[in-house]
């Protein structure tokens, strides 16, 4: 027997699906529970259970995002503000309409999983989303990674955006204008994201993040690819929030997971006037070589309800071998944020007191920690530097500098200077200190030196958070002009100045000039429209 309220919800849902254009013959599983989705995934052979009760799934051909196959519809709304190029590739509105309709037609007589979710944990910025999946585990992924509306919110839910994700639907490049059969296409005017030809679940969350990187800055909110935590006894109104920016392999997730602090979020945040808020409702952690000793919070979060991607069992068991990277190094776990024991509730904090830019410098040039000026912070934010080391890719025999603007270039529809200027204005108007932290090599480059101990890096981070480095004595090192402390509790003094840690200082000088030149070459693309003070804050080559 349907109650009046349940009938109203059914009618509202039907109206939403009709407005989306879903065929009336499509079989819809609406807002199913985690347990029901797991049961469906197991029944359909989408995954298997591990000894810990997690659902282990494969993503198929694509084990990561495909940036070259991501497009933005170019129309009146996007033509001028979007920073077009290799990252933001234009797509025809007509081609989008054709592909969109064919994807909807494809779903006739088929079964889908539909879910209402939100992004942004503050009401003023909240984005309501309807996700349509053909895979049950994809719908479970969305349940975990996005914010979960309450039952009362679902009753009145009115989605602003739609994600239509059909991995088994492949585009025809000659017909649709894509590069290959797989695609992710964002239409800001119609507020629709189309995903096809790939089963990598991360395309959904990063698609919405790209949307927010377009909409939030226009409201004066800085959208950020970073993790965030807050002091264990701190309220969201107190200034003890810390942000951790960094590309893959720099320690962003590891360093923000601190037993003495509460996790606001591990990947995507917004910074409004006086508040930092989590965009998501879950975590999407890399688990290659995961151990209980090394990352206990993540290890313990992998339990019934969690999802594992592209991992493998020890032979003849149902126990996960996290060191097995036969499929990919990008093995992942997805789980709701409340699977982390020390998460902040609500997922909010006051404006940050400290910001950390993490870089794994395999050249061994950058100091373990440096205190940045506002202009330097904007420069290194726009640079988004880390490095690849020998053996990570075919043909790499020595460290290779890698730059990703704002530590997330792949998700930025606007010119990087717009995000940097917004960061700069917040740094100037509020009491925020930015730190550059090298989690890479010391006492030499990769192959000669060694990667800095995690214990030392944690000591440096803790010294910042407890105030020890705020008023320490500093020296400036060339050619980067960075201020490094002379002392830090728990860290050998000779490591703090990288030149002093090298056995051959002259070799350090050559390596430093090489890296400084790479920074300058990378920043040439931002010369036009960037304030002169920011340009001057970068490294200077000696005559």
Image (cartoon, grey):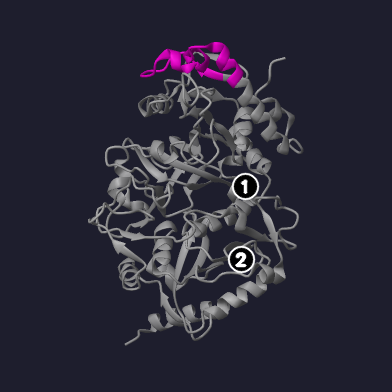
How crowded pointer 1 is (Cα within 10 Å; few <14, some 14-19, many 20+) is rated as some
Give the residues drawn in magenta, as a range.
483-511
How crowded pointer 2 is (Cα within 10 Å; few <14, some 14-19, many 20+) is rated as some
Q: Is residue 476 visible?
A: no
> SS class of the residue under badge 2?
loop
Q: Residue at x 73, y 33 (%)?
A: 531
Assess whether residue 84 is covered by the magenta stretch: no
> Does residue 101 lie above or below 80 as drawn?
below
Q: Residue at x 48, y 79 (%)?
A: 12
Q: Residue at x 50, y 47 (%)?
A: 269
> SS class of the residue under badge 1?
loop
The residue pinned by badge 1 equals: 220
Q: Is residue 284 left or right of residue 402?
A: left
For the N terminus, the image quarter is: bottom left
Q: Position of residue 376 (x, y in %)?
A: 62, 28
Assess whether residue 498 is covered by the magenta stretch: yes
């Amino acid at each position: 027997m349907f109650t009046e309220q349940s009938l109203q919800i059914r009618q509202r849902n039907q109206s939403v699906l009709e407005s989306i254009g879903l065929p009336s013959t499509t079989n819809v599983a609406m807002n199913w529970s985690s347990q029901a989705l797991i049961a469906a995934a197991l029944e359909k052979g989408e995954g298997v259970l591990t000894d810990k009760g997690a659902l282990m799934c494969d993503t198929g051909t694509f084990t990561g995002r495909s940036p070259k196959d991501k497009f933005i519809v170019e129309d009146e709304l996007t033509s001028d503000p979007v920073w077009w190029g290799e990252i933001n590739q234009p797509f025809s509105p007509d081609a989008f309409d054709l592909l969109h309709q064919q994807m909807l037609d494809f779903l006739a007589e088929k079964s889908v999983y539909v879910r209402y979710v939100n992004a942004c944990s503050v009401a003023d910025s909240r984005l309501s989303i309807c996700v349509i999946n053909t895979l049950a585990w994809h719908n479970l992924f969305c349940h975990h990674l996005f914010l979960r509306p309450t039952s009362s919110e679902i009753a009145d839910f009115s989605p602003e955006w739609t994600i239509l994700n059909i991995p088994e639907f492949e585009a025809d490049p000659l017909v649709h204008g894509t590069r290959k059969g797989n695609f992710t296409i964002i239409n800001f005017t119609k507020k629709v994201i189309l995903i096809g030809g790939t089963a990598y679940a991360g395309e959904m969350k990063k698609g919405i993040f790209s949307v927010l990187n377009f909409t939030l800055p226009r409201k004066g909110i800085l959208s950020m690819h970073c993790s965030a935590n807050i002091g264990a006894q701190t309220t969201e109104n107190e200034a003890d929030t810390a942000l951790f920016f960094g590309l893959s392999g720099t320690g962003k997730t590891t360093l923000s997971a601190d037993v003495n602090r509460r996790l606001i979020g591990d990947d995507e945040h917004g910074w409004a006037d006086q508040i930092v808020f989590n965009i998501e409702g879950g975590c999407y952690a890399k688990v290659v070589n995961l151990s209980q000793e090394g990352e206990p919070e993540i290890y313990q979060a992998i339990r019934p309800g969690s999802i594992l991607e592209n991992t493998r069992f020890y032979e003849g068991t149902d126990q996960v071998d996290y060191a097995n990277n036969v499929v990919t190094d990008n093995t992942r776990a997805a789980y709701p944020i409340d699977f982390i024991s020390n998460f902040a509730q609500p997922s909010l904090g006051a404006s940050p007191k400290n910001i950390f830019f993490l870089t794994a410098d395999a050249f061994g040039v950058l100091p373990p920690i440096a205190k940045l000026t506002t202009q330097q912070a904007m420069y290194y934010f726009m640079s988004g530097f880390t490095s690849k080391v020998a053996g990570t890719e075919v043909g790499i025999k020595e460290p290779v500098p890698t730059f990703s603007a704002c530590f997330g270039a792949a998700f930025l529809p606007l010119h990087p200077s717009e995000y940097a200027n917004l960061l700069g204005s917040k740094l100037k108007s509020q009491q925020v200190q930015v730190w550059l932290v090298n989690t890479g090599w010391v006492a030499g480059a990769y192959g000669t030196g060694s990667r800095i101990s995690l214990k030392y890096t944690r000591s440096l981070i803790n010294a910042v958070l407890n105030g020890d480095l705020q008023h320490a004595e500093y020296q400036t090192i060339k050619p980067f002009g960075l201020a490094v402390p002379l002392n830090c509790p728990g860290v050998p003094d000779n490591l703090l100045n990288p030149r002093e840690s090298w056995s051959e200082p002259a070799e350090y000088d050559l390596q430093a000039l090489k890296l400084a030149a790479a920074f300058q070459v990378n920043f040439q693309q931002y010369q036009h429209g960037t304030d002169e003070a920011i340009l001057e804050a970068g490294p200077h080559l000696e005559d």
